[in-house]
Image (cartoon, rainbow, N blue to C red):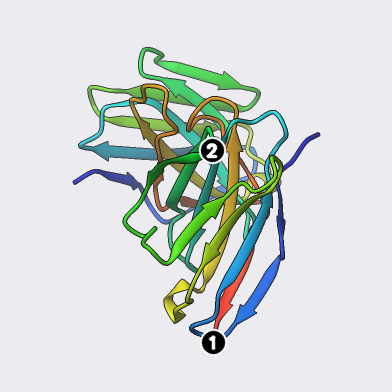
Amino acid sequence: EPEVTQTPSHQVTQMGQEVILRCVPISNHLYFYWYRQILGQKVEFLVSFYNNEISEKSEIFDDQFSVERPDGSNFTLKIRSTKLEDSAMYFCASSVLGPYEQYFGPGTRLTVT
Amino acid sequence: SQKIEQNSEALNIQEGKTATLTCNYTNYSPAYLQWYRQDPGRGPVFLLLIRENEKEKRKERLKVTFDTTLKQSLFHITASQPADSATYLCALAAISSGSARQLTFGSGTQLTVLP
């Protein structure tokens, strides 16, 4: 069964460093998403991506964040200058038809020290 | 502001009983309501989607109801098993017109099924 994959599973970085989180969505899906979940808190929407551009973004997704689909299979989230409060689990998701029936990856745990 | 509330952070039930989880929302006009399951340290897993013009949806031991007047959805697991123990998330997406609108999650209800 096709699944969303994410790498790395765990990333430790120092405050102020840039990180890139990688995702490979399900191949026939058209909509791609990033979410984050701070430990013990709810899953929060960051950004949606469709037709090679950002479709929607939340208030969390400020100028420090960017997304890219560089080669038609990978979908990346970049954080330019990490802060302590960026420590969270980051989930990539994809779907065939908009925000419905989304398939989530296993997540990348980002720890900023 | 828009809000999604799921009742009780934790729910314990005996194996074989029916678990009922509640999701209430305010200031939304959702076309769809979805339920996901999340296990510790894992990503959410889609379970069921119900449309605003549907009153009830079933899938195996799962049943979802959607009352747009009450602004509430109920999620039932019948003949519950210890393997059903997980956190269940309610999620809403507002009416979309061709764009990938955002999905907003509730904080979840942690269900424990006791053997």
Q: Identify whether A91 is placed above or below B58.
A: below
Q: Who is closer to the viewer here, B83 or A77?
A: A77
The answer to whether B96 appears left or right of B80 in the picture is left
Q: Tag 2, which secondary structure? A: loop
In which quadrant of the rendered image does the N terminus of chain A lie?
top right
> Could you tell me if residue B115 is visible in this image?
no
Furthest residue in direction top, as rendered: B53
Give the x, y percent position of residue A12: 63, 79
Q: Quadrant of residue B26?
A: top left
Report crowding for label 1: few under 14, some 14 to 19, many 20 or more residues within 10 A (C-alpha): few
Tell me the residue that label 1 is attached to. A113
Give the x, y percent position of residue A57: 38, 48
Which residue is located at x 68 percent, y 71 percent?
A10
Which residue is located at x 41 percent, y 14 percent?
B54
The answer to whether A27 appears left or right of A50 in the picture is right
Q: Identify whether A68 is placed above or below A19.
A: above
- Residue B44: image tag: none
The answer to whether A72 appears left or right of A66 in the picture is right
Foreground mark, 2 or 1, reads 2
Tell me the residue that label 2 is attached to. A52
Give the x, y percent position of residue B57: 51, 18
**Pointer 1 chain:** A
Give the CA distance from mark 2 to mark 1. Answer: 33 Å
Q: Who is closer to the viewer here, B60 or A84?
A: A84
| Amino acid type at image mark 2 | Asn
Q: Who is closer to the viewer here, B74 or A93?
A: A93
Give the x, y percent position of residue A44: 43, 54
Asked if marks 2 and 1 fall on the same chain, the answer is yes
Which residue is located at x 72 percent, y 34 percent?
A27
